[in-house]
Image (cartoon, rainbow, N blue to C red):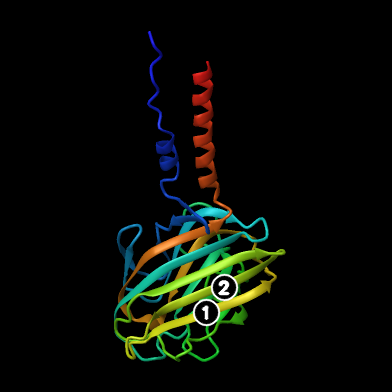
Amino acid sequence: MPAKRSTFNLGAVIVLGMFAWTSIAGGAVTPVTGWVVHNGTSTVGGTAANPTFTAGDNITLMAAFDPVVLVNDGDFITATTTLTMNTRSTTGVNTLNTQLRIGLFNGPAGAIVASDTNNLGFIIEYTNVVAGGLIREQTNSPVSQTNPFTSPTNIGNGSQDTGADSIQGANPGPVTFTLTLTRNAGKIDLTGLIGGTDAVSGNPYSASYSALGYTPVATPFTFNRIGLLLGDGVNAASASLANSSITTVPEPASLASAFLAAGGVLSLRRSRRRS
């Protein structure tokens, strides 16, 4: 009797192993889900990938991901998300100044607990002043600091929008945040971007951030949380997030494990065929 033909599909194994991950030339990308309210009070709705928060101000939001360790020069992590603020009650040009911030942190392992401490990391913030938004490191001093965006150390300034536009208006449209940390000779190169639309002028808004060759004071080269601050001045009836993701080099442990598992199955299959 002829040997039974195997129906094993290696491609399917790899796809399953990479269910939440996509490999691209610039790194491994995973969507960020499971956003929670770390500080403040708001009702969470929508979906895990596209949550809505009501109300949409005076809150700190965080989401966890598999730890990423920047071991070698050139290793990097990029966090990105898109925020939409709905029906803002205070819409002047200055009301969002310093009120929108994104950060990458290394916090306690496991699920995020509201107001937990020891979240160390880097932050960029929106501003409409000429000097540009602040670039900061959260050294978590004192250790009892319950909001990762409170009392960080200033390490630089971003560059303001070249047209002197702002993010303003009752419904200013989507605001995109991007923050990248790259290891370089045992230091951090930080770059970032906050972009949106000036709902009053109709012009695009874009502010860039750069702090190169910075020696971390307290932040290790491990990151496992993304955070977003919506300050008291946001004054939005609700706020929603979309297109949240983490891009990394090296690939996180979960992705590497998926490839190892697929390789192990392939080796076992070849061994059986030789037998």
User: In the rendering, at what x and y percent does residue 215 appear?
Assistant: 70, 70
Residue assigned mark 2: 191
Circle 2 sits in a helix, a strand or a loop, which is it?
strand
> Is residue 127 shown above or below 254?
below
> Is residue 176 shown above or below 14?
below
Residue type, mark 2 in image: Thr
Q: CA distance from mark 1 to mark 2?
A: 7 Å
Asked if the residues shown at circle 1 and circle 2 are in contact, with their CB atoms under 8 angstroms apart, the answer is yes
Towards the viewer: 185 or 133: 185
Residue assigned mark 1: 208
User: In the rendering, at what x and y percent does residue 91 appear?
Assistant: 33, 88
Residue type, mark 1 in image: Ser
Q: Quadrant of the N terminus?
A: top left
Residue extending farthest front:
2
Residue at 62%, 59% (x, y): give it: 75
Residue at 52%, 83% (x, y): give it: 133
Residue at 49%, 81% (x, y): give it: 207
